[in-house]
Amino acid sequence: EVQFVESGGGLVQAGGSLRLTCVASGVTGDDTAIGWFREAPGKEREGVSCITRGDGDTYYADSVRGRFTISIDNAKNTVYLQMNSLKPEDTAVYYCTADIRPSFLTGPQPYWGQGTQVTVSS
């Protein structure tokens, strides 16, 4: 019953921007954080950003802080990741998931979307 649908990925030149969208179904709770992991070839899955449904508290990985902005809609079902000043090292498949805020990074989370590919060229 819990599912995530990601969209918005694509190919962009370094310095460009993309906005990812995650539509979350079956996610409830003010203490739940919805956000993004990414997985690049040959690298471990990395927590990127999340936002707490109740109070809007945000988290950003050091590698994206200042460049990415996460937001959530009024219904608390759709999360956006605005990615600016993209770098080639941002190239990855981006996945959406959710967990209670203290466990978002440590998980494991049982539900993931199909992912959306972000490719940043030099």
Image: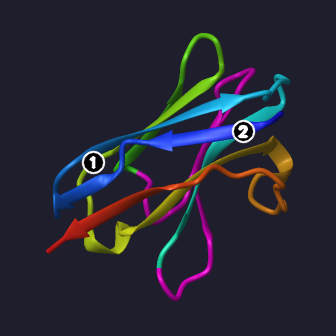
SS under mark 2:
strand
> Is residue 47 or residue 61 the one in the foreground?
47
Q: Which residue is mark 2?
A: 3
Q: Give the residue at x 85% y 24%.
A: 29
**Residue 87 is inside the magenta segment:** no
Q: Which residue is labeled 1 in the image?
A: 84
Q: Position of residue 82 (x, y in %)?
A: 37, 39
Q: Amino acid at mark 2?
A: Gln
The image shows residue 55, relative to residue 115, as above or below, that is above
Tell me the SS state at disc 1.
Answer: loop
CB under 8 Å between callouts 2 and 1? no
Q: Nearer the viewer, mark 2 or mark 1?
A: 2
User: Which image quarter holds the N terminus?
Assistant: top right
Residue at 61 percent across and 80 percent down: it is: 44
- Display coloring: rainbow
- Which residue range is magenta in the image? 41-65
**For residue 72, side relative to residue 86 (left or right):** right
Q: Earlier in the sequence, mark 2 or mark 1?
A: 2
User: What residue type is disc 1 on?
Assistant: Asn
Q: CA distance from mark 2 to mark 1?
A: 27 Å
Residue 65 placed where, x, y %? 44, 53
Q: Residue at x 27, y 72 (%)?
A: 88
Residue at 28% over, 54% down: 10
Q: Residues within 10 Å of mark 1 (few under 14, many from 20)?
A: some
Which of these two is toward me, 65 or 33? 33
Could you tell me what secondary structure mostly forms the magenta stretch? loop
Q: Residue furthest bottom?
A: 42
Q: Residues within 10 Å of mark 2 (few under 14, many from 20)?
A: some
The one of 64 and 109 positioned closer to us in this rendering: 109
Residue 78: percent from the left, percent from the top? 57, 26
Any magenta on residue 59? yes
